[in-house]
Amino acid sequence: MATVRELLDIGVARLRESGSESARLDAELLLAFALDTDRTGVIAHTDAPVGDGPAARFEAALDRRAAGEPVAYIRGVKEFHGLAFGVDPRALIPRPETEKLVELAELEIVRRLVGAPRPTGSPPLRVVDVGVGGGAVAVTVAVLLRRRKMADEVEMSATDTSEEALQLARENAVAHAVGDRITFANADLLPADDARPWDLVLANLPYVRSDALPTLPKAASFEPVLALDGGADGLRVIDRLVGLLPEALAVGGAALLEIGGDQAAEMRALVAERLPGWSCEIELDLGGLPRVTILRRPAR
Ligand code: GLN
């Protein structure tokens, strides 16, 4: 019977050969998956023997990874902001940089709820996650609000044009016990039938330039192109949402929009043209790249 170390060495070599840039991490995660344990369990027990069943499962997982499939789709799970999300080709895999969007959203909500005195009986804040995908942003924000005991003060909606993505997002919401806290709607950007303005619009929309799609890592070709393709300049979908904001945002409202690390200047230009007089801040992600645009309506 092979040991954990022996299987890992085989896996790392195999994945390196196939061009993976994170061969060791991938192999550790996939062996942990095959053994029904976590990565720590693998690293801490390198001398342990591995049975034929898990060894075969590992072999099959290596085959899929070597063919380019993302580790997250093979495992069926991806950690995001400390939560485990179910993932599959119905939606984009949550990226670590999107945690910045979640943190800023939490800050905006808390500031509104506790930073300024709210008259008793104030209506709940209205928050919408546009292009919810598999639900990482909306579900994480809902979980953070529940932890802060603020869930009742926020009304959260989420939209997507993909019915499949919405289904996955609902599954993740239920798995994290916030299924009754988020109203999901199949809609192109904002929900169609809702006239009331939003206090907060959150969005991680597709923003990859169409001509850059073939340059993404092979793993991205397993993800829905709808979730990545931002048109000729990458900002076509974001531009449509920005155009809706004057109508859609409440007084004092804000929109938090994820962008590509190289899109800050284009984003500022787009906002200056579309929303003259609005404030536009761009926050950096953990990698130091421009990542989240915060748009605020000017005070009247
Ligand atoms: N950050 C993702 C990538 O580069 C793109 C996500 C998106 O378009 N919203 O793969």
Image (cartoon, helix red, strand yellow):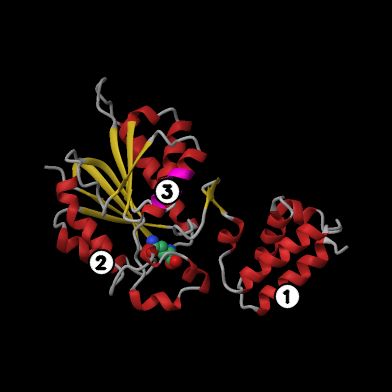
The response on whether ligand 1 sits within 8 Å of label 2 is no
Q: Position of residue 111 (x, y in %)?
A: 34, 36
Q: Identify the element where label 2 is drawn.
A: helix
Q: CA distance from mark 2 to mark 1?
A: 41 Å
The response on whether ligand 1 sits within 8 Å of label 3 is no
Image quadrant containing the N terminus: bottom right
Image quarter for ligand 1 equals bottom left
Q: Which residues are magenta?
A: 165-171
Please tell me which residue is depicted at 41% across the width and 54% down the height of the picture: 164
Q: Which mark is residue 236?
A: 2
Q: Amino acid at mark 3?
A: Gln
The residue that disc 1 covers is: 13
Q: Amino acid at mark 2?
A: Arg
Q: CA distance from mark 1 to mark 3?
A: 37 Å
Question: Based on the displayed image, in which of its 4 quarters is residue 11 positioned?
Answer: bottom right
N-terminal label among 3 and 2: 3
Query: Relative to residue 48, is residue 225 depicted above or below?
Result: below
Residue 169 highlighted magenta (yes or no): yes
Please tell me which residue is depicted at 28% across the width and 66% down the height of the picture: 235
Q: Amino acid at mark 1?
A: Ala
Q: Position of residue 192 (x, y in %)?
A: 21, 47
The residue that disc 3 covers is: 167
Query: Relative to residue 23, is residue 91 depicted above or below?
Result: above
Can residue 289 be seen here? The reply is no
Check disc 2: other Cα within 10 Å, few if <14, some if 14-19, many if 20+: some
N-terminal label among 2 and 1: 1
Check disc 1: other Cα within 10 Å, few if <14, some if 14-19, many if 20+: some
Q: Identify the element where label 3 is drawn.
A: helix
Q: Main secondary structure of the magenta part?
A: helix
Label 1–label 3 contact, CB within 8 A: no
